[in-house]
Image (cartoon, rainbow, N blue to C red):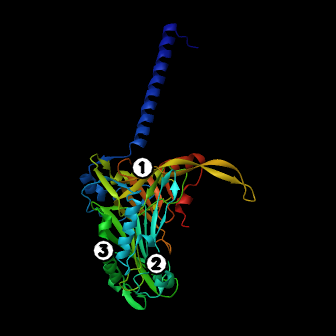
Amino acid sequence: MTKFSKRTKRTIILCAVFALIAAAIIASVLIYAHVTAEKDIITRENLSKILEDAPQALGEKYVNLTLPDSISLGGVDKLQKVSIKWLHLMTEEEAADTVMDLCATVNKDPITKSDLTINRPELDGKTSYAVRYYPKEGDYESPDDPNAFFCMVVDGYNFELTNYYWLQKVCGFGKYEKWYSADSSGLADVVYKVDGQDYSAQQALEYANTVVEKYKDYYKEFEVVPQYIIASKNDFNEEYSYAVRYAFKYGGVEISDTGSYEPMNDRDYVYQDADLTVRVASPDKLMTIFSRMEGFDVSAEDITEDLVTLSSALSHTSKTLAENFMQEISDIDIVYLGKQELIDYTYTANIEDENGNVIGTTEETVKIDGDDVIDFIPMWRFKVKEISSDMSMPAYICIYVDMQTGEMIMLNDRTGVYISEKDIEEAKQQNVDIYANVMRVN
């Protein structure tokens, strides 16, 4: 057995210690590098570079992502944070005047304030309002009667005009059967029987454009652009009507019409949608115009910092979702998506016994709008799967990646359900299938 001197033993021990320290340092460096690599997957460039390099991203490899053959990102000169104030934009008196003005565009008889119905619900100490005009029962007799229009303005941020005759006696809400892109070259050949006449999708689009032009002053800074023409089977007969859907744009960038409107009390924020629809149930006659974006007070702030590149957004999406299922991306574009903060609101609710008698009270907490401002922020939008239904068409499951933060969400356009990266991480820890909810179609 070999014997070592105390000096040699000390040297060996020191070497071993140094070796352990070195190993620890190397391990730390490797771990740090790995963590850094995990976190530092978001790369940023200036907007012009992003647009120039975007087509090249389609040639890269991503786990469980299939991509379109090409993309077009034309018309984007700059990106901004667009903020809109959407609650109580008008006083109640102004809203009443607006309803009377709108009615004057379609009704032959003058409307006075005494003809209006005003509701004033209260929530969290704030009084809301809805101003409506209901046409009289005798106005439903003829499809040519211009007095059959219902009109509504709620809180000064949306309006609706609907012809009651067509809605209640002819068309109903209808069942969407097929949609066509507004920029399609074959719309003149798409013909359905509408109120006894052959009426093409092209004719419906051209007429709807005249309606939108008539009310353009209500949209202020926003450009209104036709997106889809939808053929809808009538509820009360075998004929059809058309629904023409429009997108809003700000500075040439589309505002997404997708929203997370399903109540979710565990959320800190929701995503607001924005769109305009014109329905035509008889050739060149208005049945409905409904919109959510007019009347807004708008402010915009230029984004000067570098933004998330397409390849980085795709890589981040791949990394986050790769272990779950294949994402077949059919379309890629840049849109503004409206994000609104929510806050907790606690109220007192009655406790009743089985006979309906109040036997006590309890406090319940729900999420409500945090303020009256919605920030529309630039997002990469990846359309993954069409999930249209007879009442929601076209509808998609989309992946959005925030071009400023890199945060990813997956949103179901049909149900309004969305999941965030935080949801995905929590689901992993709890071994829960979070994707079934966002992928459901009913």
- Image height of 416 relative to 28, above or below: below
**Crowd rating for badge 3 (residues with CA inside 10 Å; few <14, some 14–19, many 20+):** few
Mark toward the viewer: 2 or 1: 2
Q: Which residue is mark 3?
A: 214
| Residue 48 visible in the shown view | yes
Mark 2 or mark 1, earlier in chain: 2
Residue type at numbered disc 3: Lys
What residue do we see at 35% from left, 48% from top?
404
CA gap between label 3 and label 2 equals 22 Å
The quadrant in which residue 379 appears is bottom left
Q: Which residue is mark 2?
A: 135
Q: Work out which residue is located at the far top of the displayed protein and give it.
A: 6
CA gap between label 2 and label 1 equals 48 Å
- SS of the residue under disc 2: loop
- Image height of 295 relative to 178, above or below: above
- All told, the count of numbered labels is 3
Pointer 2 and pointer 1: residues touching (CB < 8 Å)? no
Residue 25 position within the rendered picture, expressed as x and y whole percent measured from the top left: 44, 27
Residue type at numbered disc 1: Glu
Pointer 3 and pointer 2: residues touching (CB < 8 Å)? no
- SS of the residue under disc 3: helix
Q: Nearer the viewer, residue 248 or 158?
A: 158
The quadrant in which residue 433 appears is bottom right
- SS of the residue under disc 1: loop
What residue do we see at 50% from left, 88% from top?
238
Mark 1 or mark 3, earlier in chain: 3
Q: Which residue is mark 1?
A: 407
Q: Nearer the viewer, residue 365 or 43?
A: 365
Mark 3 or mark 2, earlier in chain: 2
Residue type at numbered disc 2: Pro
